[in-house]
Amino acid sequence: MSVIERIESCGIVPVAVIENAEQAVPTARAMLNGDIDVMEITFRTKAAPYAIQAVSEACPEMLVGAGTIVTLDQCIQAVTCGAKFIVSPGFDRKVVEWCIDREIPVVPGCVTPSEITAAMEMGLNILKFFPANIYGGLAGMKSLSAPFGKIKFIPTGGIDTKNVGEYIAVDFVFAVGGSWICPKSDIEAGNFEKITKLCSEAKKSALGFELAHVGINCSDADTCHEVSDFMNQAFGFPIKEGNSSNFASTGIEVMKEKYLGENGHIAIRTNALISAVHYLKARGFEVDWETEKRSGEKRIAVYLKGEFGGFAIHLLQK
């Protein structure tokens, strides 16, 4: 995967402030143990370039970038030390041009129409939205996404485990960033197990797995109607008829012909389908991209390979 694809697949970009470069690798490994394989090390400290170099050399499985880049000199130093992407709190044309010329992903902070327009003119479509809580959060980004429909944001500021799912589920959010999963105080104290726990909890909240519905395979349309009618007569479940299936309430889909799965399928809803695919792949579960469904350019559903208890499993984008 490309750097940008890695960021999208992870879904969460921890913003780490590291005062002692010796803490960089243990912090990165703690994040990896918590299912986070992307990190942004801020250039707010003297140790930042050395921390980036340490992670780049010792943890190749971690995609490390540099954040809080406010000058071109910082940008050059960060990339020289091994940063694979650059994040800036604001829009600096010199930094953006330098990165574009060298095909280094750059995510500048843009919160106004003028800043977004300037970034678009340079070919960028993924921008940092910082501080998100000050500039209107989801409502602010939604308003901006109306005239700038091709722009996706990485909001940072005011996001935590409680609301990360709300942010990552919307179309105009590419990923989220924040330091709540790697507090500076815990890094300095060496509380790496806590960081792993915070990362794991945030990842699960971001994915937001939940049962959407159960699909029942029928041999033909007549049998499908019989099953649907039973659900309605017995339990009062309303029937919604479709081309290939009927729904008896929102929780039961009755197929008009047999599809994947010996008995049917189980649909699992998630806030972030791409991130969910990456998460499941790390656990040994592959998806069958031939079953993918889209709404325009947006992926909305895909099946896992194989069956589980006679049921196929497919993911649904919330």
Image (cartoon, rainbow, N blue to C red):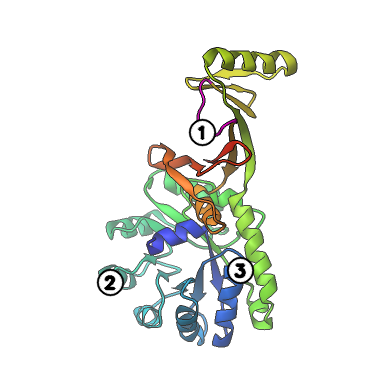
Residue that carries the numbered disc 3 in the rendered image:
33
Q: Are marks 2 and 1 in contact (CB under 8 Å)?
A: no
Dot 3 lies on which element? helix
The image quadrant of residue 14 is bottom right
| CA separation in Å, label 1 and label 3 | 34 Å
Q: In the rendered view, does 67 fall on the left or right side of 104?
A: right
| Point 60% across, 60% down: residue | 158
The answer to which of marks 2 and 1 sits earlier in the sequence is 2
In the rendered image, residue 58, in percent from the top left (x then y), is placed at 49, 81
**Where's the N terminus, which quadrant?**
bottom left
User: In this view of the protein, can residue 230 be seen by the observer?
Assistant: yes
Q: Secondary structure at mark 1?
A: loop
Residue 295 in the image: above or below residue 199: above
Assess whether residue 82 is covered by the magenta stretch.
no
Disc 1 marks which residue? Answer: 260
Residue at 38% across / 44% down in the picture? 147
Of the two numbered discs 3 and 2 in the rendering, the one whose residue sits closer to the viewer: 3
Q: Which residues are magenta?
A: 256-263
Distance from the alpha carbon under mark 3 to that under mark 2 = 32 Å
For badge 3, the amino acid type reads: Asn
Q: In the rendered image, which quarter contains the C terminus?
A: top right
What amino acid type is highlighted by mark number 1? Leu
Binning the other alpha carbons within 10 Å of mark 2 as few (below 14), some (14 to 19) or many (20 upward) gives few
The residue identified by callout 2 is: 102
For residue 135, above or below residue 287? below
Q: How busy is the neighbourhood of tag 1: few (under 14 within 10 Å), some, or many (20 plus)?
A: some
Across and down, in percent, residue 314 comes to 54, 40
